[in-house]
Structure formats: structure tokens, C-alpha cells
Amino acid sequence: MDGNGRWAKKQHRPRIYGHRIGMDNVQKITLAADRLGIKVLTLYAFSTENWARPKEEVAYLMNLPVRFFDKYMPTLIENNVKVNIMGYLDELPQKTYDVVKKAMEQTAQNTGLILNFAFNYGSRKEIVTAVQELAKEVEEGKLKSTEIDEQAISQHLMTAKFKEFGDPDLLIRTSGEQRISNFLLWQIAYSELAFSNKNWPDFDEDDLKNFVENYRHRDRRFGKI
Ligand SMILES: CCc1cc(N2CCCCCC2)n2ncc(-c3ccc(F)cc3)c2n1
């Protein structure tokens, strides 16, 4: 969800205006993804590196989840959307933590599209945490080191709960940036990558439809001929 600041600059508005319009676009794209039959939509909302941004911007961003659920929770529930937030949530401000926890509890029984926010998330930190947990199990004699395989690592990642859906099929990054930027590094090993030159606030349902349609015509090899 890149390009909110640049979008705001083009509108001669402050960066935080881009974030707020970007937040509204999260709702639009969530419902569009649901209509396209997407099972899990993971949105990279805040990386572990984003804490380095100006403190006023971080403070504004930390309040966006509160605004998002205040405005959109009724529609999310109406559309049977299940909310999940994955990240180092214990490092969030109490108010932010409380609202994301409540959103997950309120939608836990929903069975529709899973809206998964990567929030205070970083893939390398996620992998280090998984390795540390596995090493601890070996130390405690619960696991042999030879039993550490791809499945064991996957099961210790924050996406373990999405096992039934498999790894991401398609990763889209907006704003023309063609970098992964420490997002789901393990999980996207065989994902199709797509890049939109549009800034996130301009990325709409037709763009998503086109990327999914293009994906459906790609021949995925998974390393084979
Ligand atoms: C704190 C980072 C951030 C930034 C952000 N922006 C700003 C930059 C990215 C573009 C989208 C709008 N949004 N939009 C929704 C959320 C959100 C996160 C968790 C949650 F449970 C509910 C909503 C959000 N979070």
C-alpha cells in the first residue's frame, strides 16, 4: 500500500491526508477482493522499520486502526469479513492494541474473506523469532535438529494460521516501487509478483481485477519445467 505521501503531495495536501484517503481505500479494495473470491488479503500497513518516521506521523498512523474500525466495522461484519492482525502487537500503544484485539474478537466467527493486516511486522524478525523458538524446542529435547524442515519453520511463522490456504498466490506493490521490503520473505518463495505504478489511494477495483485476471493467465511453474 505504497505511495500515500506522494499522492498527497500531488494534491498539495499534507502526508497524513494521503494516509487517511489510503485508509478509505483499504475498505474499498477489501470489498473488491471479496467480490473476486479472494480468500486471504494481507495488507502491509506498518513495518518494524516505520517507527523511524517523524513521531507526529507515527502517532497519526497509530490512530488509523481506531478510525478504520469506527468507520468500517459494521460493513466488515455485514460482509462476513474476518479480521486478523499479524505483527509484534505487544509493542503497540495500548489504544491501538485494544482496538485491533477487539476487531479480531468481534469478527472471529466470520467465515468470509480474511482481512489480514501486517502491522508492526517484519519478515526477517519473524524468521529469527521462528528459528529461536525451534532452537528452544531442540534445547528442551522436544525436537531433534534433523526434524527442522520447511513445514516446521512455516508452522512457527505468523502466517501459520493460514496453512489451509497455502502461501500467497499474488503479491502486488503500488507506487512503482519494485522491492519486497522485508514482507513475507519466506511465504512468497513461489508467489507471482506484480507492480502497479499507481499510488495506493488511486489503486481501484478495476486495477485489482486486471491484476487477478493477468495472474489467472500466468503459467505457474513452482520451480518445475
Ligand atoms: C498504522 C499503519 C496503518 C496505516 C494505514 N494507512 C496508511 C498507510 C498505508 C495505506 C493505508 C492507510 N492504515 N489503513 C488501515 C490501517 C489499519 C491497520 C490495522 C487495522 F487493524 C485496521 C486498519 C492502517 N494502518
Image: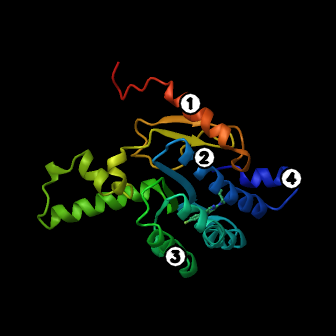
Instruction: Look at discs 1 and 3 and give the one toward the viewer.
Output: 1
The answer to which image quadrant residue 197 occupies is: top right
Q: Name the residue under label 2.
A: 32
Mark 2 surroundings: few (<14), some (14-19) or many (≥20) residues within 10 A = some
Mark 4 and mark 3 in contact? Answer it, CB < 8 Å: no
Q: How far apart are marks 2 and 1 (CA)?
A: 13 Å
Q: How far apart are marks 4 and 3 (CA)?
A: 32 Å
Q: Is residue 110 visible?
A: yes
Nearest to N terminus: mark 4 or mark 3: 4
Ligand 1 lies in quarter: bottom right
The answer to which image quadrant residue 188 occupies is: top left
Instruction: Look at discs 2 and 3 and give the one toward the viewer.
Output: 2
Task: Give the left or right position of residue 130, taking residue 115 as reference.
Answer: left
Total number of numbered discs in the rendering: 4
At horizontal 44% and vertical 62% (from top left) the residue drawn is 110
Outermost residue to the bottom: 94
Q: Mark 3 points at which residue?
A: 97
Nearer the observer, 14 or 219: 219
Label placed on residue 11 = 4
Q: What element carries label 2?
A: helix
Residue 160: x, y in percent?
33, 55
Q: Mark 1 points at which residue?
A: 213
Nearer the observer, 187 or 213: 213
Mark 3 surroundings: few (<14), some (14-19) or many (≥20) residues within 10 A = some
Q: How far apart are marks 2 and 3 (CA)?
A: 27 Å
At horizontal 44% and vertical 23% (from top left) the residue drawn is 219
At label 3, the amino acid type is Tyr
